[in-house]
Amino acid sequence: MPILSVPLAELRERSSLKWRAFDEDVLPMWVAEMDVQLPPQVRQVVLDAVNRGDTGYPHGTAYAKAFADMAAERWQLHLDAATQVVRAGDVMNSVLALLQATTSPGGAVVINPPVYPPFRKVVAGYGRQLLEVPLTPAGRLDLPALAAAFHGEVRPQAYLLCSPHNPTGTVHTAAELTEVMTLANEAGVQVISDEIHARLVEADTDFVPLIAVPGGEHALTATSAGKAWNLAGFKAGLILAGISATPRLADIAPLALEAGGHLANLAHTAALQHAQAWLDELNTEIAANKRLLASELERQLPQLSYQPSAATYLAWLDCTALNLPDPARHFRRRGRVAFSAGAHFAPSHSNWVRINLACSPNLVVEAVSRMAASL
């Protein structure tokens, strides 16, 4: 049975944010939760722990070791789990801890809009200054603009990279990342990479960890098994350091490294150790849903075009041709289907929506039908 085949009636029994934020007749395809059951191996590990009352505090380095083993097998990235990988809280709390450790209050941090909305919150909300270097119209990193920003009037202390990029699904190439590190290292800018979507990449596309490229030995990365295996309810993550950046780990606030829960660490470790094949199958199904969305838009809303991306289970759709002042609100109110509003990712993208495609194919078809009917 396909992984993305959980019946809608069963999904509506869930009490998480995705299924409780809107009225029951609204089809929720917005926040990044997947319509899946837990991988069987992960479910069993969690149940076994609960059954034996193993619900105390986290201990050990099993999560770090499991990630290092996966990185070596999947990306040929060889990490020292004892010195380069530390257990932490979820990714955004890890990013906050890294920014606090590597920048000073009032310091500038570069981001690339349109980008995951918490990037703005974690920078501006904690006393740092935002420097925006938008992606190119093609959705790639604008390397000349980054170079200019790194040497501008306001010299940034850090650059917060999203890799793969959310919401566009862009997978940065090794050449792009190498140039990023060259520019940042020359300018003395600390690069912090959010790589939570790293395993949500199609099989024929190479994801390159930032710390694996030349110059990446100075980079820091926040990552987690939470996104790829749908474990957001089990908050845990990891912080990775390039060889030359390992001393920076000592600057991280101690409590930030104790923010993950014991059950969360067990679940994430089990996913990395035992559910790689499950995720490979899921990525195949997500790629099929992206192709399905493209074909359904061509059939039902030919004025829109969508080019499937190689990463994430998200679709980034330009709705400018529909002449709607707020497409996400229109589709939610008139079509009863909820997408994420593009303006949340960048004010310049108010005519865009982000669509969550980690659902059954019939819901993809239903969503497009509701969009078309709303017009």
Image: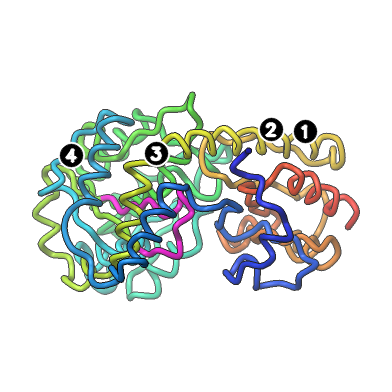
- Classified by dominant secondary structure, the portion drawn in magenta counts as loop
9 sits to left or right of 226:
right
For marks 4 and 3, give the CA distance: 28 Å
**157 and 93: which is toward the camera:** 93
Q: Residues within 10 Å of mark 3 (few under 14, many from 20)?
A: some
Tell me, yes or no, whether the two marked residues, 2 and 4, touch with CB atoms within 8 Å. Answer: no
Tell me, yes or no, whether the two marked residues, 1 and 2, touch with CB atoms within 8 Å. Answer: yes
Q: Which residue is mark 3?
A: 143
Q: Which residue is mark 2?
A: 291
Q: Magenta residues, as a range?
A: 221-235
Q: Is residue 14 above or below residue 357?
A: below
Q: Position of residue 249 (x, y in %)?
A: 14, 58
Tag 4: amino acid = Leu
Q: Which residue is mark 1?
A: 295
Tag 2: amino acid = Arg
Q: Residues within 10 Å of mark 1 (few under 14, many from 20)?
A: some
Q: Residue furthest top?
A: 204
Q: Residue 357 shows which numbered tag?
A: none
**Residue 108 in view here:** no
Q: Looking at the image, which residue is at 19% across and 65% down?
A: 101
Tell me, yes or no, whether the two marked residues, 3 and 2, touch with CB atoms within 8 Å. Answer: no
Q: Residues within 10 Å of mark 2 (few under 14, many from 20)?
A: some
Q: Residue 79 shows which numbered tag?
A: 4
Q: Specify which label sits upstream in the sequence, 2 or 4.
A: 4
For marks 2 and 4, give the CA distance: 35 Å
